[in-house]
């Protein structure tokens, strides 16, 4: 029996639909941010970089991602 597991996650105010649940690391990969210096907040709480792979996202989550930009 196939079930529709699509979730909607709001990232920086924009809704993103995904075919299946994913974790924070997978989200960064989908958004082409993997390997970049970012800070990620899920539902108002900072997610430590060491937990990105373990932190599962759920339908309706609100994520804020800030990308560090170098300059001089």
Image (tube, grey):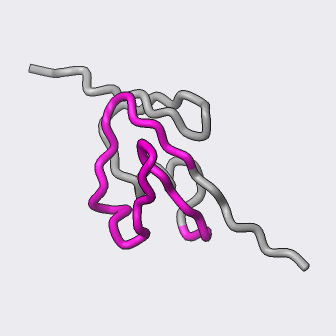
State which quadrant residue 58 falls in: top left
Pick the front one: 10 or 35: 10
Horizontal placement of 55 versus 68: left or right? left
Pick the front one: 42 or 17: 42
> Residue at coordinates 76% horizontally, 68% vertically from top-left?
69
User: How many dots with numbers?
Assistant: 0
State which quadrant residue 48 falls in: bottom left
Q: What span is in magenta? A: 35-64
> Residue at coordinates 18% horizontally, 21% vertically from top-left?
3
Q: Is residue 25 magenta?
A: no
Q: Give percent across and percent down for residue 29.
A: 50, 55
Which residue sits furthest bottom?
Answer: 72
Q: Give percent across and percent down for residue 55.
A: 30, 55
Q: Quadrant of the N terminus?
A: top left
Which residue sits furthest left?
Answer: 1
Which residue sits furthest front?
Answer: 44
Question: In this picture, is 64 found above or below 15?
Answer: below
> Residue at coordinates 33% horizontally, 26% vertically from top-left?
6
Q: Give percent across and percent down for residue 30.
A: 51, 48
Question: In this picture, is 36 found above or below 10?
Answer: below
Horizontal placement of 67 versus 54: left or right? right
Q: Quadrant of the C terminus?
A: bottom right
């Amino acid at each position: 029996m196939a079930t529709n597991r699509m979730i909607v996650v709001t990232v920086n105010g924009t809704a993103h639909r995904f075919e299946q649940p994913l974790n924070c690391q997978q989200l960064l990969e989908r958004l082409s941010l993997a390997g970049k210096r970012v800070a990620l907040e899920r539902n108002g709480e900072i997610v430590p970089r060491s937990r990105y792979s373990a932190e599962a996202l759920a339908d309706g989550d609100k994520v804020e991602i800030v990308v560090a930009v170098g300059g001089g």
